Image: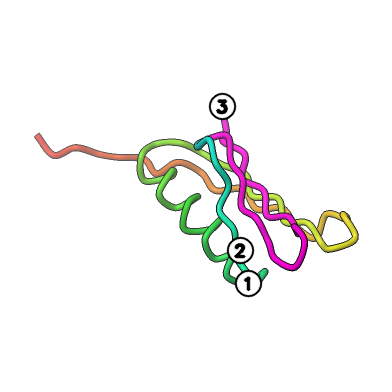
């Protein structure tokens, strides 16, 4: 199951929301919100969880989607 991460406009800023955590992260810049969403997706991938990032414009339209696959972890024995 993929985790969902959304970057959406909120008032004068931007929020990052995910089903991976309870609260949202707030940013003044859309670019900083997107960067945080990508970092979250990378962290999830490293822990073995796939995710999908949805980025929305101020008018509510979907600007882009990115799928991030879970990393295959190989343990040396």
Which element type, helix, strand or loop, lies under badge 2?
Answer: helix
Classified by dominant secondary structure, the portion drawn in magenta counts as strand
The answer to whether the residues at label 1 and label 3 have Cβ atoms under 8 Å apart is no
Q: Mark 2 or 3 closer to N-term?
A: 3
Q: Residue furthest left?
A: 77
* Residue at the spot of label 3: 1
Decide: few, some or many residues near mark 1? Use Cα within 10 Å; few <14, some 14-19, many ≥20.
Answer: few
Between disc 1 and disc 3, the foreground one is 1
Q: Real-space Cα distance between discs 2 and 3?
A: 22 Å
Q: Split into 4 quadrants, where in the image is the C terminus?
A: top left
> Is residue 19 rendered to the left or right of residue 74?
right
Dividing the picture into quadrants, the one containing residue 23 is: top right
> Is residue 40 rendered to the left or right of residue 53?
left
Q: Tell me which segment is drawn in magenta.
A: 1-19
* Residue at the spot of label 1: 31
The answer to whether the residues at label 1 and label 2 have Cβ atoms under 8 Å apart is yes
Q: Which of 68 and 20 is in front in this view?
A: 20
């Amino acid at each position: 199951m993929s985790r969902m991460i959304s970057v959406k406009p909120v008032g004068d800023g931007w929020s990052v929301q995910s089903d991976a955590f309870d609260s949202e992260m707030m940013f003044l810049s859309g670019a900083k919100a997107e960067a945080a969403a990508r970092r979250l997706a990378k962290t999830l991938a490293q822990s073995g969880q796939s995710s999908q990032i949805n980025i929305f414009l101020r008018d509510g339209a979907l600007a882009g989607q990115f799928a991030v696959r879970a990393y295959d972890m190989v343990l040396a024995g």
